[in-house]
């Protein structure tokens, strides 16, 4: 019987980088008491309330994965990842391996107001277009340009422009996006940096890079990613 339960959990977990929720298990006929026995036996490892890691799996970004899955515990493992909370702001930067910002509390963008009782989860309300989100490393996340723009405008987080500039630089050097791709999201957002007038996205992006100690750049004719070096 335990082998059968494990096979059921494994079928879900393999589609979620090794993770499964109690709600998903119960929906497939596995009781919470049975989950407790499996956890006691070390077959599954509790990560946070209602979220488990199947033994033998070692995904990266484990904390972010557990938090994200806990916000949609009854999701269909075969469903569209971006039809639900989206990792954004500093959490998205961590998924993109950009910058040095702390991803705690974990920011998740949702279209309607939502609250969490957990201090390590923070919901942001914004209607994201399909072009604003993607899947990276098996997680739903804001695209690089949207991520940088969100960090720049984030009054709640209060990020230093130099830190946001470091995120932008890492996105460019890591070839996660192009100069033009990031700049598109920064058009007319220079107010946060003290820039006046109808500031272009390119000017805002260069101001961010300069504040982080990098040289000024321009978009290449081909729109390819750029190599960014500190000044």
Image (cartoon, rainbow, N blue to C red):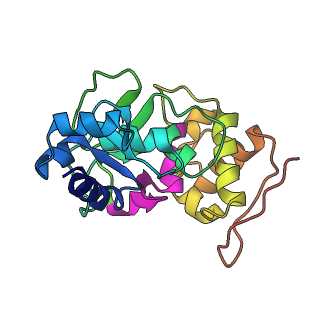
Q: Where is residue 72 in the image (x, y as percent from the top left)?
A: 25, 43
Residue at the far bottom: name it: 222
Is residue 109 shown to the viewer in this render?
no
Q: Where is residue 73 in the image (x, y as percent from the top left)?
A: 23, 43
Residue 53 lies, with reference to residue 159, above or below; the image says below
Task: Identify the residue shown where x is 24% and y is 39%.
Answer: 35
Residue 175 lies, with reference to residue 194, above or below; the image says below
Task: Identify the residue shown where x is 81% and y is 41%.
Answer: 213
* Count of marks placed on residues: 0
Task: Identify the residue shown where x is 66% and y is 37%.
Answer: 100
Task: Identify the residue shown where x is 34% and y is 41%.
Answer: 52
The residue nearer to you, when weighing 138 against 14, is 14
Is residue 72 shown to the viewer in this render?
yes
Q: Where is residue 101 in the image (x, y as percent from the top left)?
A: 61, 34
Indicate yes or no whether the magenta region holds residue 150: yes
Left or right placement of residue 15 versus residue 215 in this view: left
Range drawn in magenta = 130-151
Indicate yes or no whether the magenta region holds residue 119: no
The residue nearer to you, when weighing 48 against 210, is 48
The residue nearer to you, when weighing 208 against 36, is 36
Q: Position of residue 9 (x, y in %)?
A: 27, 53
The residue nearer to you, when weighing 69 against 225, is 69
Left or right placement of residue 13 versus residue 202 in this view: left
Please tell me in which quadrant of the rendered image residue 176 appears.
bottom right
């Amino acid at each position: 019987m335990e082998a059968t339960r494990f096979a059921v959990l494994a079928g879900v977990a393999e589609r979620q980088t090794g993770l499964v929720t109690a709600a998903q298990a119960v929906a497939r006929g596995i009781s919470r008491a049975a989950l407790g026995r499996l956890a006691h036996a070390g077959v599954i490892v509790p990560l946070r309330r209602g979220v488990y890691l199947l033994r033998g799996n070692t995904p990266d970004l484990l904390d972010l994965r557990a938090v994200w899955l806990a916000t949609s515990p009854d999701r269909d493992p075969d469903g569209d990842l971006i039809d639900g909370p989206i990792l954004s702001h500093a959490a998205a930067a961590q998924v993109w391996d950009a910058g040095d910002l702390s991803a705690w509390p974990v920011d998740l963008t949702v279209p309607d107001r939502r609250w969490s009782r957990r201090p390590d989860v923070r919901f942001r309300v914004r209607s994201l277009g399909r072009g604003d989100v993607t899947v990276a490393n098996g997680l739903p996340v804001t695209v690089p340009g949207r991520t940088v723009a969100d960090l720049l405008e984030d009054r709640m987080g209060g990020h230093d422009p130099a830190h946001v500039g470091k995120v932008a630089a890492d996105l460019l050097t890591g070839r996660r996006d192009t100069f033009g791709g990031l700049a598109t999201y920064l058009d007319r957002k220079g107010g946060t940096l003290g820039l006046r007038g109808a500031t272009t996205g390119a000017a805002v992006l260069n101001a961010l890079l300069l504040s982080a100690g990098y040289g000024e750049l321009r978009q290449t004719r081909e729109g390819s990613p750029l190599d960014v070096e500190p000044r």
